Image (cartoon, grey):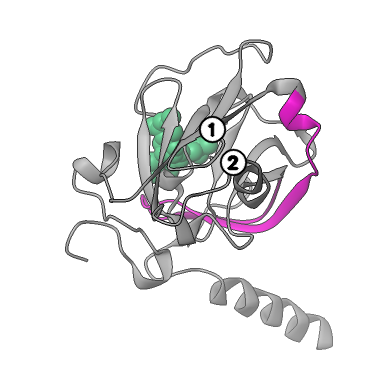
C-alpha cells in the first residue's frame, strides 16, 4: 500500500501548488497571443533597458547570451485558469540587466514592451530580487516563436500575461502606467495566489 500512499501524497503536493481557481494543464502548453506572431531573427533582436536609469543599455542577441545565465524551475499560471507545473526556463535574471543599467532612486515601476507593441506594467519590486527573467530556452531547447522566441519576459509569481513575449524593452518609470491587458480590465498586479484576475479583485 505504500505505493498508493506515495501516489496520493504526490497528487496532494501538486494540488497544493495550484492557486485558487486554477487547474493542472498537464503536458500541453496553450498559446495565448493577442497579435500576429512575429518572425524575429536573433540578429535583429535586441533588448533595451531605459527610462529612469543611470545608463540606458541595449543588448544584442550575442551580448545578452554572454551574461551570467539563470534558470527558473517551477510553475506558471495563466489567468484563463491553466497552470503548468514544473517548467524550466533559462535566460538572464532581470537583476543582472538592472545592475548594468542602474535604476534611479525614483524608479518604481516597469513597463515591459514587446516589439509587436504589446505592453504590460509591473512594480519594480516584482522584477527584482530573483523574481523575473528574460528567457530564451524552455526545457533546455530554444524558446518556440509562438511562445515568445527568440526571448520573452518571465515573471512566474504573477499571472502569465505579465510575461511579455518578444520582449524588446523594459522602461523604468516613477508612476504606474497600465499595459495592454491592464487597460482592458485585467488586474494591475495579477497575483494568482490572491486571485487578482480583473480590476477590483
Ligand atoms: N507580446 C505578447 N506577450 C504576451 C501575450 C500577448 O498576447 N502578446 N499574451 C500574454 C498572456 S495573456 C499569456 S497567458 C502568456 C501566454 O504565453 P504562451 O502563449 O507562451 O502560453 O503570454 C503573455 N504575453
Ligand atoms: Mo493569459
Measured as percent of width and height from the top left, residue 40 is found at 58, 13
Is residue 30 visible in this depiction of the protein? no
Q: Is mark 2 within 8 Å of ligand 1?
A: no
Quadrant position of residue 58: top right
> How many numbered discs, if any?
2
Q: Is mark 1 within 8 Å of ligand 1?
A: no
Measured as percent of width and height from the top left, residue 114 is found at 45, 27
Q: Is residue 59 above or below residue 8?
A: above
| Residue for point 40% across, 17% down | 36
Mark 2 lies on residue: 101
Q: Is residue 72 magenta?
A: yes
Q: Are the residues at dot 2 and dot 1 in contact (C-beta closer than 8 Å)?
A: yes
Mark 1 lies on residue: 56
Point out the stretch of residues depicted in magenta: 63-89
Is residue 22 visible in this depiction of the protein? yes
Measured as percent of width and height from the top left, residue 51 is found at 42, 37
| Residue for point 36% across, 58% down | 190
Q: Quadrant of the C terminus?
A: bottom left
**Dot 1 lies on which element?**
loop
**Dot 2 lies on which element?**
helix
Q: Quadrant of the N terminus?
A: bottom right
The picture quadrant for ligand 1 comes to top left
Cα separation between marks 2 and 1: 6 Å
Measured as percent of width and height from the top left, residue 23 is found at 46, 61
The numbered mark, 2 or 1, whose residue comes first in the sequence reads 1
Q: Is residue 47 above or below residue 126?
A: above
Q: Is residue 83 above or below residue 102?
A: below
How many neighbours does mark 1 have within 10 angstroms: few (below 14), some (14-19), or many (20 or more)? some
Quadrant position of residue 19: bottom left
Q: Is residue 116 magenta?
A: no
Q: Nearer the viewer, residue 166 or 78?
A: 166
How many neighbours does mark 2 have within 10 angstroms: few (below 14), some (14-19), or many (20 or more)? many
Amino acid at each position: 500500500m505504500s505505493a498508493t500512499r506515495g501516489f496520493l501524497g504526490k497528487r496532494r503536493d501538486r494540488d497544493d501548488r495550484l492557486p485558487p481557481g486554477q487547474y493542472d494543464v498537464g503536458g500541453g502548453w496553450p498559446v495565448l497571443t493577442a497579435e500576429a506572431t512575429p518572425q524575429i531573427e536573433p540578429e535583429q533582436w535586441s533588448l533595451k533597458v531605459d527610462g529612469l536609469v543611470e545608463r540606458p543599455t541595449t543588448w544584442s542577441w550575442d551580448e545578452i547570451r554572454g551574461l551570467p545565465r539563470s534558470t527558473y524551475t517551477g510553475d506558471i499560471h495563466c489567468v484563463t485558469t491553466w497552470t503548468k507545473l514544473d517548467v524550466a526556463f533559462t535566460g538572464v535574471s532581470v537583476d543582472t540587466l538592472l545592475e548594468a543599467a542602474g535604476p534611479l532612486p525614483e524608479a518604481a515601476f516597469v513597463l515591459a514592451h514587446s516589439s509587436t507593441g504589446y505592453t504590460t506594467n509591473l512594480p519594480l519590486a516584482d522584477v527584482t530580487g530573483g523574481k523575473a527573467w528574460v528567457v530564451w530556452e524552455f526545457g533546455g531547447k530554444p524558446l518556440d516563436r509562438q511562445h515568445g522566441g527568440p526571448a520573452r519576459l518571465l515573471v512566474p509569481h504573477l499571472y502569465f500575461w505579465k510575461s511579455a513575449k518578444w520582449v524588446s524593452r523594459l522602461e523604468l518609470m516613477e508612476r504606474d502606467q497600465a499595459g495592454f491587458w491592464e487597460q482592458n480590465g485585467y488586474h494591475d498586479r495579477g497575483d494568482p495566489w490572491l486571485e487578482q484576475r480583473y480590476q477590483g479583485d
